[in-house]
Image: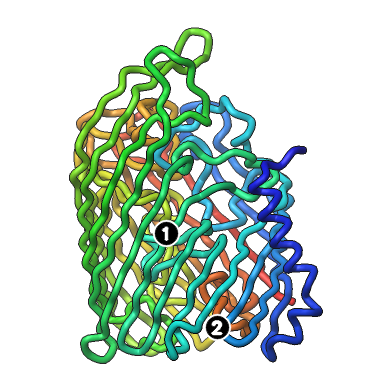
Amino acid sequence: MKLNPLMAAGMGLGFTLLWACPTLAALTEQQNFGIEIKATAQAEDDRDLGTRSGGDVNGVGLDLRPWVYGERGDWSGYAMGQVVTATDIIQTDPLEQSNSDGSGTQTSRGTASERETDKTYAALREFWIGYSGFTPYPGEILKVGRQRLRNDDGQWHDTNIEAINWSFDTTLLRAELGAAQRFSEYRTDLTELAPDDEDRKHLFGSVSYQWTPGHWAGIRAHHSADDGKLKSQGQVLDDLDKTSNGDLTWVGLQADSDAYNYRSNVNQLNYWGSLTWLDGTRDEIGVTSAANDQFIAGQKNSRDMNGWATDLGLRLRLDPQWQVGAAYSRASRDYVQNGLESNRSNWTGTRSRIHRFGEAFQGEMANVETGSLFASWQMNEEYDASLIYHKFRRVDGNTGIGGSGINAVNDNQDGTFSSLPLEDGSKDLGQEMDLVVTKYFKQGLLPASLSQSFDEPSALVRLRAGVFKPGDAYQNNVDSYMHRAVVDVIWRF
C-alpha cells in the first residue's frame, strides 16, 4: 500500500506526537493522553428505496482513537489517530455523511478505487500546534494543522481539515478568523481527495456578541474558491474528476438564546435563528452515461449562484427534565452549503448531537424545506432522549436536492446535486420519525483546549434511529419505508 507524500508526512508527525506521551506527560497536570474505544452496530434498509440491488447495511465495527495533548506556556500540541475495523461499511463517525451515491454534491459513479471505502483502515484525525499568547484572555488560541472546525449549529463548520484558525471566546465576545484547504484524507483507504475538495480553498470569519445575559447575536462569512480543472466535452469521467467549480461567498446573520448550550442553559424559552445569503458563479459540465458503462463529460455551462437559507427554532422547557419545541428550515433552489458542515448539533436541548435533517434522511440545505417537532428528556447527567418528527419538501419541484442518505437509482448525473427525486413537479420528499436515547456512565476529564475535538465528554451507550417514509417525489415504485439505526458504545482510558 502506497501513501501519498502529504498523508505520509501528516501521519508521521501525528504518530510521533503519540509516541512522545511520556515527554508530554510532564508538561501539564491534566490528563494528556489516552484512547477512546468505540463499538458501533448499524442496521440500514434500504438506502436505495428498492430501486436497485444493495443499499442495505448490517454490521458491527470497532473504532480505536488514541490521542495525546501537551502544553508548555502559551504553546500546545495535539494529535489523534484512528484505527477502524468492521464487518460492513458502517458509519462509525457521525461526521462522515452516508458515502454512497447520496453523499456530497457530486454523484459517485464507482469508477475510482482510490475513493472506495474499506472495512478496515487507519487514519490520522487531527494534528495541530496551538499558540495562546496574542491576548491575555484564556479563551484565545491560534491553531495550525489538521483540526476540528466546529460551530454550534453544525450548519456552517463541523469537520476535520487542514487549517490556520484563530478563535477568541470570552464571556461577552466570540470571534473566529481562518483559512482552510483539504490536502489529504489521511486514511489508508481513501488515497485521493474527493473531487469537491480538490483545489478548493476556504476563507472564513465570524463574530458574535452577548448583548444581554444569555442572548447572542452575530455575523459570519465564508468564501470558497475552487479553481480545479474540468474535463473537456467528450472525455471520459471517473470519480476523481470534477464536474463543477467556481467561487462562492456566504454571509449570514444569527441570533440565539445560547440554545445549543445544554450544560448551563436553564431558560424556560429558548430560540435560535439564522439567515444566510449565497452569491457567486459556478461552472458545471453535464454527465452522460455511455453504452459501455463509461461516463462522458458534456458541455460546460456557467451560471450565477444567488440563494438564501434560514433555520429557525423554539424550545419550551416544561420542567427541569422535559422540553418540547419546533423548528423550520428552508433553502432556496440555488442555495448550497459550503461543504464543511455536518448539520449535527444539540438543537433538541440535550447532550446528544442530532442530525438537524433526520438520522435516516440526513439531508442538506439545498432546495429543501423542513418542518420539525420534537420532545426531549434529560435526567441529571445520566440519561437523555429525543423524539423527533420531520416533514421534508422540495422548494422547487423541478430541481434536484442536495446530498442525502436516500439514494434512489435515477440520480441526476450533471454533478450539481447528488440526489434527484424521480417525479418532476412533485415537492413532497417524505417524512421521518427519529429516536435518540443515551445512557452516560462517567464524566471524562479532558483539557479545555480539546472541547472541539471530542463530541462526547464521557463514556456512553447511544441509540440513533430514524424511519423515513418517501413522499410523492419518489414515485410509487419505491419501498414504503427506509430505516437507519446505529448503536454506539464509547469508553475512554
Image quarter of residue 460: bottom right
The answer to whether residue 261 is visible is yes
Residue extending farthest top: 291
Q: For numbered disc 1, what is the local secondary structure?
A: strand
Q: Relative to 199, say whether 329 is above or below.
A: below
Task: Classify 324 as above or below 181.
Answer: below
* Residue 470, image x, y percentages: 36, 41
Q: Which residue occupies the foreground of this view, 248 or 48?
A: 248
x 28%, y 61%: residue: 221
Question: Which mark, residue 22?
Answer: none
Relative image position of residue 166 (x, y in whole percent): 43, 72
Residue 197 percent across, percent down from the top left: 47, 43
Kind of residue at disc 2: Ala
Which residue carries the number 1 mark? 179
Mark 2 vs 1: CB contact within 8 A:
no
**Residue 101 as seen in the image, left or right of residue 89:** left
Q: Name the amino acid type tagged 1.
A: Ala
Could you tell which of marks 2 and 1 lies nearer the N-terminus? 1
The quadrant in which residue 372 appears is bottom left
Where disc 2 sits, the SS reads helix
Relative to residue 391, is residue 103 drawn left or right? right
Assess disc 1: are there few (<14), some (14-19) or many (≥20) residues with their C-alpha within 10 Å of its C-alpha: some
Mark 2–mark 1 Cα distance, whole angstroms, equals: 23 Å
Mark 2, Cα crowd under 10 Å, few <14 / some 14-19 / many 20+, is: few
Q: Read off the residue under disc 2.
A: 448
